[in-house]
Amino acid sequence: METTLILLKPDTVERSLIGQVVARLEAKGLKIAGLKMMQLDDAIINEHYDFLADKPFFPNIKAYMTRTPVVAIAASGTNAIATVRMLTGATNPQEALPGSIRGDFGLTIDGNIIHASDSAETAAVELKRFFKGQDVFDYKKISDDVL
């Protein structure tokens, strides 16, 4: 069982798509182990996007990610990281397949709806960053006994 971080970005919140995205995650069998809305500040943006800090477009990312709250989700399940990445689709919504979250909802590369951890190592770091080691729960779903 893996747990991964998902961020529903400002355009998801602004376009009232939170429920539709969460429903897709749950319909695929993922367990929502943590869920919170939060306003990101410069410190967390600088830490989360440190690999882009020297890029000319970094100020635009910072402005985008701080303009409205985001929804942080800890999602658990068998192969959760790969499953979420598949559901998410390509980073550029114009290249994302129909049926993927970005393919169906993304409008531009700058407003691409969702972030998903890309590896177990990244997920561990990102989950601690957004959930501070708390508010991620382990519980049994009724369907766990059936599957």
Image (spheres, rainbow, N blue to C red):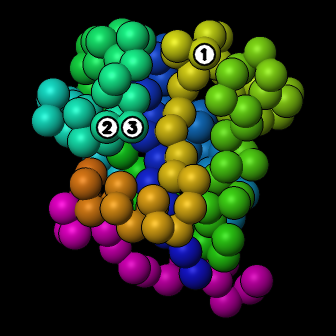
Q: Position of residue 135 (x, y in %)?
A: 24, 65
- What residue sits 39% from the left and 37% below the top? 51
Q: Position of residue 38 (x, y in %)?
A: 22, 36
| Placement of the N terminus among the 4 image quadrants | bottom right
Alpha-carbon distance for marks 1 and 2? Answer: 19 Å
Residue furthest to the right: 98
Q: Is residue 123 left or right of residue 43?
A: right
Crowd tier of the residue under label 2, counting other residues whose Cα lies within 10 Å: few below 14, some 14–19, many 20 or above:
few
Q: Is residue 68 visible?
A: no
- What residue sits 67% from the left and 89% below the top? 145
- What residue sits 78% from the left and 27% below the top? 96
**Residue at mark 3:** 51
Q: Are marks 1 and 2 in contact (CB under 8 Å)?
A: no
Of the image marks 3 and 1, the number of the one nearer the N terminus:
3
Q: Position of residue 47 (x, y in %)?
A: 24, 42
Of the image marks 1 and 2, the number of the one nearer the N terminus:
2
* Amino acid type, mark 3: Phe
Crowd tier of the residue under label 3, counting other residues whose Cα lies within 10 Å: few below 14, some 14–19, many 20 or above:
few
Instruction: Give SS at disc 2.
Output: helix
Residue furthest to the front: 54
Q: Position of residue 56 (x, y in %)?
A: 39, 11
Look at the image and give the residue range highlighted in magenta: 132-147
Crowd tier of the residue under label 1, counting other residues whose Cα lies within 10 Å: few below 14, some 14–19, many 20 or above:
some
Q: Is residue 9 left or right of residue 48?
A: right
**Residue at mark 2:** 50
Give above or below for 117 relative to 80.
Answer: above
| Placement of the C terminus among the 4 image quadrants | bottom right
Identify which residue, 20 or 81, lies in the foreground.
Answer: 81
Give above or below for 133 relative to 139.
Answer: above
* Amino acid type, mark 2: Asp
